[in-house]
């Protein structure tokens, strides 16, 4: 028997592989069936570029806006769940209150889908230094570091605040806040890069991260992965 990390009820967990590359560690389910059903998998029709809400083979409203700015150079994003109350609640507890144990729930929600996407480099979206100091951990790296080998190519400029605390229009008006770290030895050009974040909201963060990497490595093939859209 195990206690569900969200509701505290006892349940019988199923066991599966967690680590994609080493297969060293088994993952024991940490969410009961009841809590799992509160999350809404994206199924059927969705935006062909970012998994947003759209009819099959159409673009969502966000991608139509990005198309005006970027033309054909759109960022393909893979997402698993629709943003809903259950996801909102878990992210508030994880990010605002720094509940580190919830990374296990987020890992459980994404690891099976993530292991289907192969990339040469998995690059997490960096958390600002101020937020790491506040929570004592990097919220994105904490989710993905036990699932795939991470390449910390990006840094965040200081004093930029978090997108999560901004309104939609403030997010879209935000300025480029990512830098590609100096002295990267890896041969990133001509290889595939999967950017990793928790949520795709407007796409602003991920496009800036993509732009920074694309400037440094013009021939890299960059796409992104988020648990939620
Ligand atoms: Zn539960
Ligand atoms: Zn879209």
Image (spheres, helix red, strand yellow):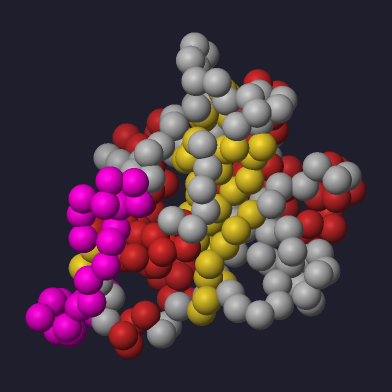
Spot the residue most to the bottom: 34
Q: Residue at position x 68%, y 42% from top? A: 207
Q: Residue at position x 21%, y 50% from top? A: 24
Q: Residue at position x 77%, y 47% from top? A: 74
As displayed, is residue 173 above or below residue 57? above
- Left or right, 119 with reference to 133: right
- Left or right, 13 with reference to 112: left
Q: Is residue 60 visible?
A: yes
As displayed, is residue 43 above or below residue 209? below
Task: Name the residue nearer the viewer: 125 or 98.
Answer: 125
Task: Name the residue nearer the viewer: 207 or 151.
Answer: 151
Give residue 106's quadrant in the image. bottom left
Q: Residue at position x 29%, y 58% from top? A: 18
- Left or right, 125 with reference to 222: left
Residue 97: give x, y in percent of width and height.
Answer: 32, 56
Residue 11: give x, y in percent of width and height.
Answer: 17, 84
Spot the residue most to the top: 183
Give residue 91's quadrant in the image. bottom left
Residue 71: give x, y in percent of width and height.
Answer: 88, 44
Q: Is residue 98 visible?
A: no
> Is residue 15 inside the magenta stretch?
yes
Q: Which residues are magenta?
A: 1-26
Residue 214: give x, y in percent of width and height.
Answer: 69, 29
Spot the residue most to the left: 1
Q: Main secondary structure of the magenta part?
A: loop
> Is residue 100 inside the magenta stretch?
no
Task: Name the residue nearer the viewer: 178 or 19.
Answer: 19
The C terminus - image quarter = bottom right
The N terminus - image quarter = bottom left
Q: What is the tally of numbered marks visible in this picture?
A: 0
- Left or right, 192 with reference to 159: right
């Amino acid at each position: 028997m195990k206690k569900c990390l969200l509701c505290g009820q006892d349940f019988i967990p199923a066991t599966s592989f967690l680590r994609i590359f080493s297969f060293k560690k088994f993952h024991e389910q940490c969410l009961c069936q009841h809590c799992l059903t509160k999350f809404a998998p994206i199924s059927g029709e969705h935006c062909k570029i970012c998994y947003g809400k759209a009819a099959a083979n159409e673009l969502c409203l966000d991608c139509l806006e990005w198309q005006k700015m970027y033309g054909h150079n759109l960022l393909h994003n893979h997402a698993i769940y629709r943003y809903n109350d259950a996801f909102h609640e878990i992210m508030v507890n994880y990010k605002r209150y720094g509940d580190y144990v919830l990374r296990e729930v987020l890992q459980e929600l994404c690891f099976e889908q993530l292991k289907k996407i192969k990339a040469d480099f998995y690059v997490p979206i960096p958390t600002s230094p101020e937020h790491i100091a506040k929570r004592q951990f990097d919220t994105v790296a904490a989710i993905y570091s036990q699932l795939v080998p991470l390449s910390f190519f990006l840094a965040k400029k200081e004093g930029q605040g978090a997108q999560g605390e901004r309104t939609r229009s403030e997010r879209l008006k935000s300025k480029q806040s990512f830098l590609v770290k100096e002295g990267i030895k890896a041969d990133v050009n001509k290889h595939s890069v999967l950017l990793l974040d928790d949520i795709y909201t407007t796409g602003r963060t991920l496009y800036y991260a993509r732009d920074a990497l694309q400037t440094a490595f013009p021939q890299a093939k960059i796409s992104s992965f988020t648990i939620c859209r």
